[in-house]
Image: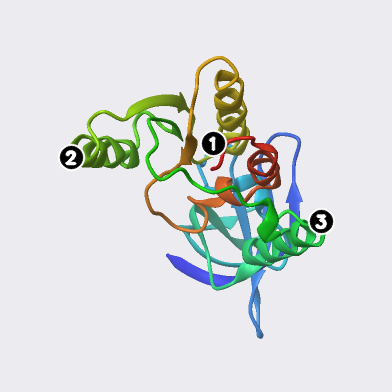
């Protein structure tokens, strides 16, 4: 069944299982998300989020109550992730990270660029295709990184840092940080503070 509601009474166990209820204006339903169930942005799940759940409705015999065994979770509407994103933007804006004078001009005719993305990403194929068609002499240095999932934001930030170190020995004109489209959850690694700061500290334009 599919069930929609707001998460409440979230309890994350040391075992990795997560127990919570979802509620609406009239009622609530107990749910369990087992450790082995893959869910995007699992570490970001918290009370107050509006979610759409897919799973099996069972009876927890010890208490004689219905319980949803969650197999899939989708975040709904603005939700807590969007709220977190807006709060982070406000924080970094207050620190001046988005000021116009910080922005570095892009070279009009780059000769070598660094690309931070996944080797398996369709975005990389797109970049290479466009380069071969429009600027075949352009050299590309790739810093491989995952583009989604837990820890991807650290790999992306590290890719930016590695290319800056590489540029101390070999000239690079700019960095292209890229991936394909996806849901808010899929793209979340690009909204993390560690990556924003790596970009702000980059000597090379990104």
Residue sitting at x 66%, y 85%? 25
Residue sitting at x 64%, y 36%? 202
In this picture, residue 110 sits left or right of residue 189: left
Q: Residue furthest front?
A: 108
Helix, strand or loop under label 3: loop
Alpha-carbon span between mark 2 and mark 3: 41 Å
Going from N to C along the chain, the mark reached first, 1 or 2, is 1
- The mark lying in front, picked from 2 and 3, is 2
Q: Position of residue 31 (x, y in %)?
A: 61, 58
Residue sitting at x 54%, y 49%? 105
- The mark lying in front, picked from 1 and 3, is 3
Count of numbered circles on the image: 3
Q: Position of residue 22 (x, y in %)?
A: 64, 68
Going from N to C along the chain, the mark reached first, 1 or 3, is 1
Q: Does the image show residue 29?
A: no
The residue indicated by pointer 1 is 36
Q: Are marks 2 and 3 in contact (CB under 8 Å)?
A: no
**Label 1 crowd (10 A; few <14 / some 14-19 / many >=20):** few
Is residue 23 placed above or below 144 in the rendered structure?
Answer: below
Label at residue 181: none
The residue indicated by pointer 2 is 133
Residue sitting at x 62%, y 69%? 79
The residue indicated by pointer 3 is 95
Q: Position of residue 15 (x, y in %)?
A: 70, 34
In the rendered image, the quadrant that contains the C terminus is top right
Alpha-carbon span between mark 1 and mark 3: 40 Å
Q: Position of residue 189 (x, y in %)?
A: 57, 45
């Amino acid at each position: 069944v599919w069930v929609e509601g707001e998460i409440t009474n979230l309890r994350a166990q040391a075992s990795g299982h997560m127990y919570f209820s979802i509620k609406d204006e009239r009622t609530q339903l107990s749910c369990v998300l087992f450790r082995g169930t893959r869910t995007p942005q699992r570490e970001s799940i918290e009370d107050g989020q509006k979610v759409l759940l897919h799973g099996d409705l069972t009876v927890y015999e010890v208490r004689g109550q219905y319980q949803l065994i969650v197999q899939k979770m989708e975040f709904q509407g603005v939700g807590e992730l969007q709220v977190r994103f807006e709060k982070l933007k406000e924080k970094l804006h207050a620190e001046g990270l988005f000021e116009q004078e910080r922005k570095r001009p892009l070279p009009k005719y780059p000769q070598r660029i660094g690309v931070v993305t996944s080797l398996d990403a369709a975005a990389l194929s797109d970049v290479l295709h466009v380069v071969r068609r429009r600027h075949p002499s352009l050299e590309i240095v790739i810093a491989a990184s995952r583009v989604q999932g837990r820890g991807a934001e650290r790999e992306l930030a590290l890719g930016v840092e590695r290319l800056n170190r590489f540029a101390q020995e070999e000239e690079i004109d700019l960095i292209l940080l890229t991936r394909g489209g996806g849901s808010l959850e899929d793209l979340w690694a690009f909204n993390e503070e560690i990556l924003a700061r790596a970009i702000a500290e980059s000597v090379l334009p990104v």
